[in-house]
Image (spheres, helix red, strand yellow):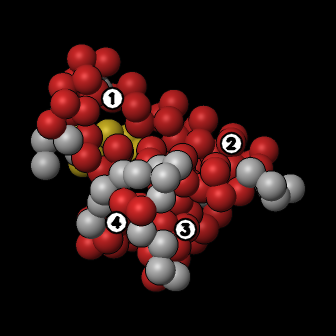
Amino acid sequence: MTWPREIELAPEAAASINQILGIVIDAAMGGWTPEGDPLLGWNFDLSEVVALEARLSEVFTPDQLSSGGGEAHVLDLHIEEVALVLHGMAYTEVMSADYPWIDMVRWTSDFVAGELRPLWTEQEWVDFSAVG
């Protein structure tokens, strides 16, 4: 993993990330594979998704991960993990496009992207994209 950042993560962001990771895990368990998806052909290892979900549950309580309430906690995140979450959000948006909750999905995506993506510079994202 590369370029870790120690961040103070708000419980609302942790709950949103946890929900996104759960959706990706559910989809993978249902047989969906990202490599074969023409809209979202991205590659990930399911064990990385599970590991990030486990790290969140080590730092945040189950109540915080479901309600988003409580105090912020410090967590180390790597650019690969954030890229995984951002791709998971894209998948969630595409799969939810025809449902009435799409506005909430978009709000969550905007919120999480606003919290996480700026932790790395545009150049770091470009460099990561070239190798990642």
Left or right: where 75 falls relative to 34: left
Q: Earlier in the sequence, mark 3 or mark 1?
A: 3
Determine the secondary structure under disc 2. helix
Helix, strand or loop for disc 4: helix
Q: Which residue is mark 3?
A: 23
Residue under label 4: 49
* Residue 48, horizontal then vertical, whole percent: 27, 65
Q: Is residue 70 visible?
A: no
Residue 36 % position (x, y): 42, 62
Residue under numbered circle 1: 119
**Residue type beneath disc 3:** Ile
Q: Residue at x 47, y 58 (%)?
A: 37
Kind of residue at badge 4: Val
Distance CA(mark 3)–CA(mark 1): 24 Å
Alpha carbon distance from label 2 to label 3:
15 Å
Q: Is residue 125 visible?
A: yes
Specify the amino acid type for callout 1: Leu
Residue at far right of view: 100
Distance CA(mark 1)–CA(mark 4):
20 Å
Per the rendering, the mark at residue 106 is 2
Q: Amino acid at mark 2?
A: Arg
Whichever of labels 4 and 2 marks the residue nearer the N terminus, that label is 4
Tag 3's secondary structure?
Answer: helix
Observer-side mark, 2 or 1, equals 2
Image x and y of residue 80, in percent: 25, 46
